[in-house]
Amino acid sequence: MTRVLVLQGPNLNLLGTREPEIYGHETLDAIHGRMASRAAELGLEIAFFQSNHEGSLIDRLHERDFDVVIINAAGYTHTSVALRDALLAVHPPFWEVHLSDPWQRDEFRKTNFIHDIATATIAGHGAQGYIEALEQIAAQFGGAA
């Protein structure tokens, strides 16, 4: 069974109340619930990890107990060379997901330290982007063996 780690960056724990006009009204727990249901349908094993701390995200990657990563690095997308280095060191195939489209927002959000090393990027599709990533992973790697 393909093991998927969903890695969520800073402030995503505030989804549902944080700038809902940009990020929507759905909470992170609700998104994870939908993802868990869809992963089960696709025959994927799934685990979730969210942190507001860069080192915690990096430490979680270092555990290497997954086959594929879905990552929303949030603000660290635009600032973290260390997170990029961890992704390169651990070298999982990974899908980069953003609820909004950072390239259509503030100028500083156009800097992206992980886009060029991602297997795929899904941006601007809201919470549905996570489901799309799961479906692409299942199509590429399969679910249950």
Image (cartoon, helix red, strand yellow):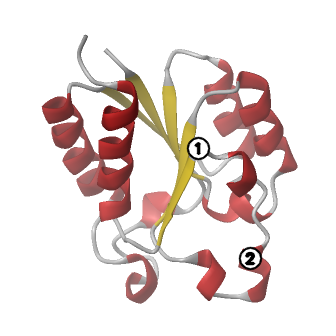
Q: Earlier in the sequence, mark 2 or mark 1?
A: 2
Camera-near label (2 vs 1) is 1
Specify the label residue 65 is tagged with.
none
Q: Position of residue 129 (x, y in %)?
A: 37, 61
Q: Hey, what amino acid is under mark 1?
A: Thr
Which residue is located at x 45 percent, y 84 percent? Answer: 22
Q: Is 75 on the left-hand or right-hand side of 88?
A: left
Q: Is residue 8 visible?
A: no
| Callout 2 amino acid | Lys
Q: Quadrant of residue 61?
A: top right
> Which label belongs to residue 110?
2
- Quadrant containing the N terminus in the rendered view: top left
Image location of residue 119, percent across then percent down: 58, 43
Which residue shows up at 37% across the image and 71% down it?
126
Horizontal side of 143 relative to 3 (left or right) equals left
Quarter of the image where the C terminus is located: top left
Mark 1 is surrounded, within 10 Å at the Cα level, by few (under 14), some (14 to 19) or many (20 or more) other residues, namely some
Q: Neighbour class for label 2 at 10 Å: few (<14), some, many (≥20)?
A: some
Rendered image quadrant of residue 48? top left
Mark 2 secondary-structure assignment: helix
| Looking at the image, residue 137 lies above or below residue 96 | above
Helix, strand or loop at label 1? It is: loop
Instruction: Locate residue 90: give its quadrant.
Output: top right
Percent position of residue 16, x then y: 33, 72
Residue 9 visible in the shown view: yes
Q: Is residue 66 left or right of residue 133?
A: right
Report x, y in % for residue 125.
Answer: 38, 71
Q: Nearer the viewer, residue 55 or 93?
A: 93
Which residue is the site of mark 1?
Answer: 119
Mark 2 near mark 1, Cβ–Cβ under 8 Å? no
Q: Residue at x 24, y 35 (%)?
A: 39
